Amino acid sequence: MIIAIDGPAGSGKSTVAKMLAKHLGINYLDTGAMYRALTWKALQQKLNLEDENALCRLMEQTNIRFQHEQKGLQVFVDDINVTKEIRSPSVTNHTHYISGKPRVRAIMVSLQRRIASEGDTIAEGRDMGTVVFPLAEKKFFLDAKIEERAKRRFHERGILHSENSLDDITKEIELRDQRDTTRKESPLKISEDSIYVDTTHLTINEVFHRILQEVEPLLKNK
């Protein structure tokens, strides 16, 4: 069983996906972390991020895997734990180079499908319902007004420790939205069979229960 959750930055999809996976006792696939992981390695090796051939070779030589631990999902690149490193501003600001390369995405999609084939999975990202898992049993598209999404990111980074102002983060998300929705390869968009959930005025628990009521019948019918 595949449950696909898509949406823009700050919509709440990662938090809800983790909660659902834990509650249901099934796998959680963070596809965004996979692109970040490859970006981290490319930066470490000082590759030209515009060189698609070099990035494809790197992808084929890289082992990206997840490990579920008590402290949360851990991301490994060639047995190096990069869970914290892939959330750095440097990686965040360069991931779009990787995610915009068609052949890199093709290799990544193949890997994502292989991981999901290992068991029931909550897959979260930007093209789960449209490209990676078009036949998913349930699809959700989470969204929220950009002002609310920016506030969430601001608080996630820690008000006292954030390097950016709320205005900076709003502009950052606007740019990311523009890149995600206009890229030629697998743009962010809602599929016709996705359930749209506006999380602007919902707590994370409300979003969780909204999705859970749609998913639970699937488990009863298994």
Image (tube, grey):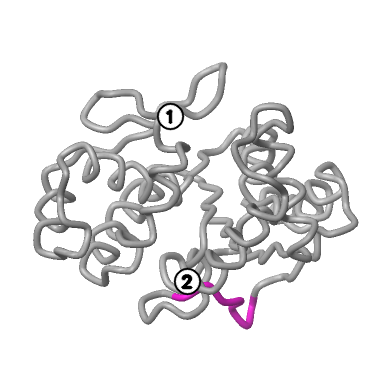
- The residue where tag 1 is placed is 83
Residue at the image point whose x is 14% and y is 58% from the top: 56
Q: Which of the two discs, 2 and 1, labels the residue nearer the N terminus?
A: 1
Dominant secondary structure (helix, strand or loop) of the stretch shown in magenta: loop
Q: Which residues are magenta?
A: 187-193
Q: Position of residue 96 (x, y in %)?
A: 38, 61
Residue 182 location in percent, x, y?
Answer: 47, 80
Q: Amino acid at mark 2?
A: Arg
Label 2 vs label 1: CA separation? 24 Å
| Residue for point 62% across, 43% down | 164
Q: Quadrant of residue 95?
A: bottom left
Could you say where residue 13 lies in the image, as x and y percent from the top left? 65, 52
145 to the left or right of 74: right
Say which of 141 and 150 sits in front: 150
Residue reaching furthest to the right: 201
Give left or right: position of 104 versus 89.
left
Q: Is residue 188 above or below residue 85?
A: below
Q: Secondary structure at mark 1?
A: loop
Q: Is residue 192 above or below residue 62?
A: below
The residue carrying mark 2 is 179
- Identified at 83% across, 48% down, the residue is 209
